[in-house]
Image (cartoon, helix red, strand yellow):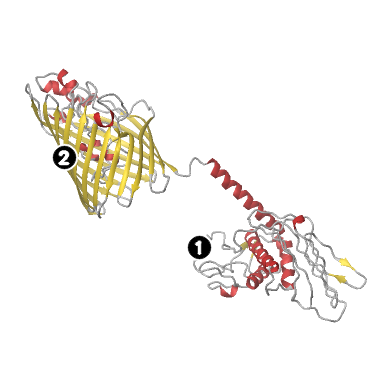
Amino acid sequence: MFVGATLLISSSAVAATEEALPEETISQESAVKPTTTVETLTLQALPEVTSLTQSVLASDLPLVADASDASTGYTVKLSNSTTSNSTTSNSTTSNSTISNSTISNSASDSVTSYGDEETAEDDLMGPVTGVSQLSGQTVEDDSMEQVTNVSQLRDISPGDWAYEALRSLVERYGCIAGYPNATFRGNRALTRYEFAAGLNSCLNQIERLLGGVTGDFITREDLESLQRLIQEFETELATLGARVDNLEGRVAFLEDHQFSTTTKLKGEVIFALADAFGGDADDVQTVFHNRTRLNFLTSFTGKDMLQTRLQAGDAPTLITGAGGELAGTQEGRFTYDGPSGNDVIIDILRYKFPLGDKVTVQLLANRALHHYYVDTVNPFFEGRAGGSNAITRFAERNPIYRIGPFGAGAALAIKPIKDVRIDLGYISNTASNPQEGQGLFNGNFSAIAQLVYGSDFKVGFTYIRGYENNGAGRPRLILGGTGTALANLNPTALGNATSLGTVDFDTARVESNSFGVETSLRLTPNIVLNGWAGYTDAELIGLGDAEIWNFAAGIAFPDLGKKGNLAGIFGGAAPTLRGLDLDNGNSNFDNDFAYQVSAFYKYKVNNNISVTPGVVWLLNPNQSSDNDDVVIGTLRTTFTF
C-alpha cells in the first residue's frame, strides 16, 4: 500500500508544451504486488481559479516532496514541472507527472453539449453525473482498428481508447453532466475540441477531489489514464483557452461598437409608376414616384417605444394641379404622395408607454394625426400612409380622422374590458408658437374621442372637434388630402360658388364638429367587409355654415393566391360639400356626390418585396356630374426591411 503519497494537479488549463511527458516505468524491489488505490493523501491547497480565462502560473503552485513507500519503492509525484525518470542502483522509480499548464476553468464543471449541431438546454431534470444514470443512448464498439496516436484522429469515436478512458473517468468522478432528457449521446463521435472540453471538465473535478479529501480517493490507474490523455490532447486543451479568450474579446468589441442595444431600424421604400386619363386629366404625364421612410424604434423598458421616422421622397400629387374642372381637388391621391425634392425631414417623433395594464399613453412631438394612434376600424385597407395596403388615401380610413393640420399633442388608449377600447387625443400645429393666440391651447387644434367595440365584428363611434386658422389662401378645413375642393373649403372654389368672392374666405377661421361610424366584419379568415359614414358641421366664423358628407364600403381578400398577398375593392363618396348656409350673400354650386372606386392586388414576391397594380375611377370629380370621369392607374413596388 502507498502511504503518504502526495498528489497535486493544477486548476489551470493544460498548455501545449514542447516537452513530452515521460512514459512511466515501474520496477519493484520486493515481491510485494503493488495495489492500485491510494489510501492516504497528503495535499497542499491549490490556488483557486474562478474565471474561465484566469490562468495560473507555474510559480504559483507549490512544489511537493516525493512520497514513497519503503516496502514497494513506488513514487507518485505530481508537480508544476516536467519530471524525467530517475534511476537508482536498486530500482527505477516511476514518476507520474501531471504538469501545470493552461486548462481554463469554466463557470460550470459540466459539459452539456457534444454534437456539432446540439444546443445546450436548461437542465430541468437536474445534472446527470454518472454514466449509469443516463438513458436513451448506448455506447457501442465500432470495431475500429487500434489507433496508437490519438493526435492523428480527426474525431474521437466510441471505440477509441481515449473515448473509453474519458468515459471511465466520467463514470467514476461525475465530471460531465448529461443532457436534460437524461441521455449521454455517447454513440456519437466527438471532435477533438469537444473531447478536450470534456477532458478539461474531468481535470477540474479531480482537482477538487484532491483538494478537499473527504473520503474520495483517486486510483493510480485513473491518474495514469489522465496523464496520457493530457499528453495526447495538450494542443486542443491549450486552444480551448485561446478560443474562449478570443470569443470574449469579440463579444466585448460588439458591445462597445454596436449602435444601440435598444433601437431597431425598420424601413420602407416605394417606387411607383402612375398616370391619369379622362377629361382634363389627359394632360397629366406618366410619372415615376419614390418615397423612403426609415423608422428608428427604441425601447427603454421593453414595454415602451420611442419612434423617430425620417422621410424623403419625390411624389407630387397627380391631378390636383391639372387645372380646369379638376382644379383644387384632393380626389384620387395616393397614400404615399406629397413629398417633393427628396428632402429629408423628421416625419414622426413620438413616445408610447403603458400606464398600468389598461392604459397606454402617447406623447407626439410633431406632424401627428389622429390615425397614428387610434383604431380606424378599417383592417387590411388601413396602412398608415404606407405602401402595403390600400392605394388611395380615401380607401385607408374615414376622412374625418385627418381633420386638422399636422401637429404635436398627446393621446390615451383605454381598454377597460375585453373588446372595448376608448381613445382620447389632442393635437395642435401651433403648440411650439409662444405668440398670443397661438400655443398649445389657444391656436389650431383637433381633439378626438372614440369608442370601439368588438373583435371579428367591430363598430366604432367617433367624435372630433377642431379649430383651424390656416395661412391665407390655404384650404380652411384640412381633410388630409381627400375630398373635393369645396369640401376642403378651398377659398378659390368657395369664391367661385358664392357671391362673396375669394377674399372673404382667404382668412376665414373654421370651427368644426365631426361624427363618424365605422364598422368591420370578418366573414372568414380570407374575406373582410368594412364600411363607414362621416359627417362634418363646419362653421366659417362670421360667414356661415357648411355641411360635408362622406361614406364608403370595401371588401378585402387577405392571402388571395398565397400567404401575404392582398386584394381589395373599395368604393364610396369622397368628402363632398352638400350644403352651405351663408349669413350674407348666396351660393350656387354643384353638390353631386364625388364617387370614387379603387381596386388593387398586392403580390408578395418575397418577405421584403411586393408589387401592387391598382386602378382608381373618379365619378363626378369635384362634385359635378358635368365633369368627365377620370381613371388613374398605378404600379407600386414596395421594399421593406
Left or right placement of residue 67 versus residue 527 in this view: right
**Does any portion of residue 211 appear in the rendered image?**
yes
Q: Residue 538: which numbered mark, if any? A: none
Amino acid type of the residue tagged 1 in the rendering: Asp
- Mark 1–mark 2 Cα distance, whole angstroms, equals 56 Å
Left or right placement of residue 546 versus residue 569 in this view: left
Amino acid type of the residue tagged 2 in the rendering: Phe
Q: How many labels does the image show?
A: 2
Q: Circle 2 is placed at which residue position?
A: 515
Residue 599, percent across and down? 23, 40
Residue 209, percent across and down? 68, 69
**Does any portion of residue 148 appear in the rendered image?**
no
Q: Who is closer to the viewer here, 70 or 18?
A: 70
Please tell me which residue is depicted at 43% across the width and 45% down the height of the picture: 300
Q: Looking at the rendering, which quadrant does residue 390 occupy? A: top left
Quadrant (top left, top right, bottom left, bottom right) of the N terminus:
bottom right
Q: Residues within 10 Å of mark 2 (few under 14, many from 20)?
A: some
Q: Looking at the rendering, which quadrant does residue 67 occupy? A: bottom right
